[in-house]
């Protein structure tokens, strides 16, 4: 079993579009927050501390696949269940299931990297930090 | 060959995160705009007109798959190449390639539906409107 | 004393810009959510219920004045203190103080209206609903 | 007469809320982009170049005052007229008028500073760079 953390979201009026449902880019906004929250909840220091030690500035996305199952609207309370389902050499797979109580709203699988700044601009992938892997598995 | 439309984006300071690159949910914001722009550029009336005639309120996303190839930052001018690569009974596949001149930044395949409001709230999928299909192929 | 409600915000990585501080439009995003939350916390039904009864669709902004006192960054927990400081005929003044514990981050005074849809598009101001005023004072 | 620059915005579906009008924080998103665009259009180098030379990382907001005159919705083309109306010692006043052709949608007066990173985090105000003032007046 993978360690799983739940991130809570309140859907607000401004998160919804003229069709009165959540405008989908907002799901990715919440998923990105849930991703970072997962690491914090597992006891990993925030990126600005890891930047001092190993140059880590964040976990940018390489690949994402998402399915939208039900719509959500303002007033809804959502729970995002997050885990890391796979560790690769320089990347990892992070999974999200967005629930409204018992109902699935959407789910998402991401490939992310641990990134450091590259000289001259841009970013590069770090090898998976072992301490992070240990805390998050 | 599928009809292809190009949507232009300027990357702004506020689109970028503390890693100084585009925060990825913003790509989905632009892709959603590029999706709607595609229909307008093909001569399809805006949704609020189609709502009067056939109840169409938008084209919500069912499924998306995206790959991030290069980072972009503020000051960049991006071109999003959009086409519809497949028509199904009640859904269609819309493709996006986000370019910075000759360089690919990311690409994305979406499954979307033509949606109408459902009584009591929520949305339902309409059959593919033939006039829209004809204009966009 | 005006009735005051506190709305809680976690600042996320994606809320911050390349200067590593909250990108200011996000404060207005939170303030708008805090505005709506204020009404709910005072026992006012959500707008989609008020729309059925009196046509109310939201409380759009007429005027806003905001001062930014300190910067905030990701990882911060913010508290937004909200009250209505003045009732006019067809508008009201809503006040916000955004705190990080004892430190003030920003404050804001807004003039808002209770809006209904106008025939042919756009919105119009409703007279202040007495039941809402009673609950929120 | 102050030098004036016009920034163009297309209002998108996702910029609008369930009331079918632009969700107001988006105006501040556009205004922030218009602010930066103003400097570029006046011939000021982008902030990441000014950071190398004088440590300038952006022009964060100190104070803003905005009035919303008319609503806008998706499909609208907006023009944001920008100028700097006042120069102070360590701040300046930037003015915005958002038009839809001949109709005013909103206007806004901001106090901003030229900011550098402060040791230990946070930002500090730089004196007005004379070369920037000369180009923008």
Image (cartoon, coloured by chain):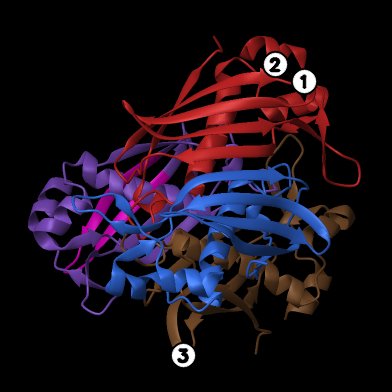
Chain colours: A purple, B brown, C red, D blue
Q: Which residues are magenta?
A: A80-97
The C terminus of chain B lies in quadrant: bottom right
Secondary structure at badge 1 equals loop
Q: Nearer the viewer, mark 1 or mark 3?
A: 1
Residue at 69% over, 70% down: B37
Q: Are marks 2 and 1 in contact (CB under 8 Å)?
A: yes
> Where is residue D90 drawn, in percent x and y?
40, 54
Same chain for marks 1 and 3? no
> Where is residue D93 drawn, in percent x and y?
54, 54
Q: Name which quarter of the figure residue D48 lies in.
A: bottom left
Badge 2: how crowded within 10 Å, few (<14), some, or many (20+)? Answer: some
Q: Which residue is mark 1?
A: C128
Q: Is residue A67 left or right of residue D19?
A: left
Q: Are marks 1 and 3 in contact (CB under 8 Å)?
A: no
Q: Is residue B93 left or right of residue C130?
A: left
Q: Is residue A98 visible?
A: yes
Q: Are marks 3 and 2 in contact (CB under 8 Å)?
A: no
Chain of the residue that carries numbered disc 1 in the rendered image: C
> Where is residue A61 drawn, in percent x and y?
34, 64
Q: Which residue is mark 2?
A: C132
């Amino acid at each position: 079993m993978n360690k799983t953390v739940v991130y809570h979201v309140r859907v607000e009026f401004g998160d919804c579009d003229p069709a009165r449902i959540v405008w989908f880019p907002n799901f990715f906004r919440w998923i990105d927050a849930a991703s970072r929250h997962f690491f914090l909840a597992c006891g990993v220091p925030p990126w600005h501390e890891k930047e001092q030690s190993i140059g880590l500035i964040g976990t940018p996305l390489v690949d994402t696949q998402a399915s939208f199952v039900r719509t959500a609207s303002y007033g809804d309370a959502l729970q995002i269940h997050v885990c890391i389902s796979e560790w690769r050499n320089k990347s990892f797979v992070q999974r999200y299931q967005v629930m409204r109580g018992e109902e699935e709203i959407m789910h998402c699988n991401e490939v992310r990297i641990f990134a450091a700044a590259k000289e001259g601009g841009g970013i590069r992938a770090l090898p998976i930090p072992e301490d992070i892997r240990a805390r998050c598995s």
